[in-house]
Amino acid sequence: MIFEANVEGWRELIPSYMHVRLQFDQLISLPSEPDDDIVERQKRFCFYLRPQGTDDSEIGQRVGFSGPPSC
């Protein structure tokens, strides 16, 4: 999968990085033919993208990181 993140006016939750949030909503039941036991489950995943052409060390100096960002 290729994701091209050339977006104008993106929001900075961590300065100089693009914030992406995915949310998955699921309805779950133990039996394959559910009755009244359906449970709703929501999962959220967040990750940050560094824009092309930027340097981690330059961003780190600007925002005060002690080293490169890591997971």
Image (cartoon, rainbow, N blue to C red):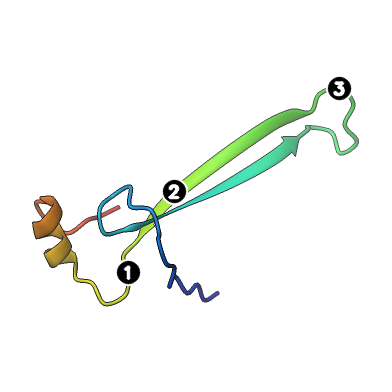
As helix, strand or loop, the secondary structure at mark 3 comes to loop
Residue that carries the numbered disc 1 in the rendered image: 51
Q: Amino acid at mark 2?
A: Cys
Q: Position of residue 71 (x, y in %)?
A: 30, 52
Question: In terms of depth relative to the viewer, which is nearer, 17 or 24?
Answer: 17
Q: Which part of the image, by quadrant, shows the N terminus?
A: bottom right
> Residue lying furthest top in this view?
36
Question: In terms of depth relative to the viewer, which is nearer, 14 or 31?
Answer: 14
Query: Which disc is residue 36 wearing?
Result: 3
Question: In terms of depth relative to the viewer, which is nearer, 30 or 14?
Answer: 14
Q: Nearer the viewer, mark 1 or mark 3?
A: 1
Q: CA distance from mark 1 to mark 2?
A: 16 Å
Q: CA distance from mark 3 to mark 2?
A: 32 Å
Q: Amino acid at mark 1?
A: Pro
Mark 1 closeness class: few <14, some 14–19, many ≥20 residues within 10 Å: few
As helix, strand or loop, the secondary structure at mark 2 comes to strand
Q: CA distance from mark 1 to mark 3?
A: 47 Å
Q: Nearer the viewer, mark 1 or mark 2?
A: 1
Q: Position of residue 2 (x, y in %)?
A: 52, 76
